[in-house]
Image (cartoon, rainbow, N blue to C red):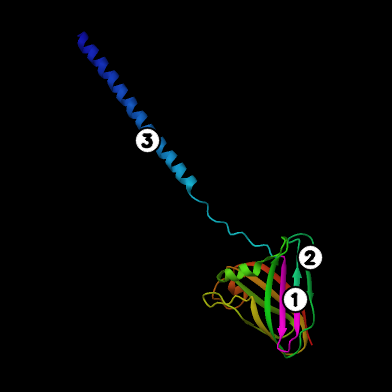
Amino acid sequence: MNNSKNQNTTNSKFLNFTTMKNYILYSFILLTGLLFNACSDDDTPPAPVDEEEVITTLMVTLTSNTGQTITLNSQDLDGDGPNDPTISVSAPLSVATTYSGVIELLNETVSPAEPIHEEVAEESAEHQFFYTQGGNINVTTNYGDFDGNGNPLGLSFSLSTTSAGQGTMTFTLRHEPLKPNDGTLSGAGGETDLSVTFPITIE
């Protein structure tokens, strides 16, 4: 009788020990798995952040087929600050004249100034300039450079005038526009990196 009781006690202790041992083993496996996942997550490199470039200055150089050079310049050193950009046009455009245009973009918050147009050219598939006119002017523009897929970029272009008049020209740089597009801002979509309007006189 006592032997049976002692045997039952021994079996109970053995079962409790086995249960505890299994519990500890399962807990260890679970903890190891959690730690492994945590380490794996930590080792995963963060996704690269595509930082928006700072553009303080837009310079458009127009060179006519007769050798005349006209510069359109916009400088906004305080960015979103309270000061308006300084905008200038060096001379009126001439009637019935074709100009070759080149656009330069700078970040002048650093020294030396950073040529942002070079980065735009390198990322040509993700950018496009648009030229729009307003008021009483009639000009025709054509793209002079393209991305690797043959879609317009617009850091270089041609501009032709017809008759005299006064109005405006707006240069807009879009980031990640739809390509190809219909040549309009509404059709291209994307985000506006820069938009500058210049007063234009043709005489």
The answer to whether residue 111 is left or right of residue 180 is: right
| Residue where numbered disc 3 is placed | 29
The residue positioned 75% from the left and 65% from the top of the image is 76
Is 30 or 74 nearer to us in this picture?
A: 74
| Residue stretch rendered in magenta on the structure | 56-72
Q: Judging from the image, what secondary structure is the residue with disc 1 in?
A: strand
**Is 62 colored magenta in this rendering?**
yes
Spatial separation of the CA atoms under disc 1 and disc 2: 16 Å
The answer to whether residue 9 is left or right of residue 100 is: left
| Residue where numbered disc 1 is placed | 72
Dot 1 or dot 3: first in sequence order is 3
Dot 1 or dot 2: first in sequence order is 1
Spatial separation of the CA atoms under disc 2 and disc 3: 64 Å
Q: Judging from the image, what secondary structure is the residue with disc 3 in?
A: helix
The amino acid type, in three-letter code, at marker 2 is Asp
The residue positioned 23% from the left and 12% from the top of the image is 5
Q: Where residue 152 sits: x, y (%)?
A: 58, 77
Residue occupying the far front of the picture: 112
Quadrant assignment, res 181: bottom right
Residue 151, above or below 5 = below
Q: Where residue 86 sits: x, y (%)?
A: 79, 69
Dot 2 or dot 3: first in sequence order is 3
Residue 84, above or below 68 = above
| Residue where numbered disc 2 is placed | 84
Label 1 or label 3, whichever lies nearer to me, is: 1
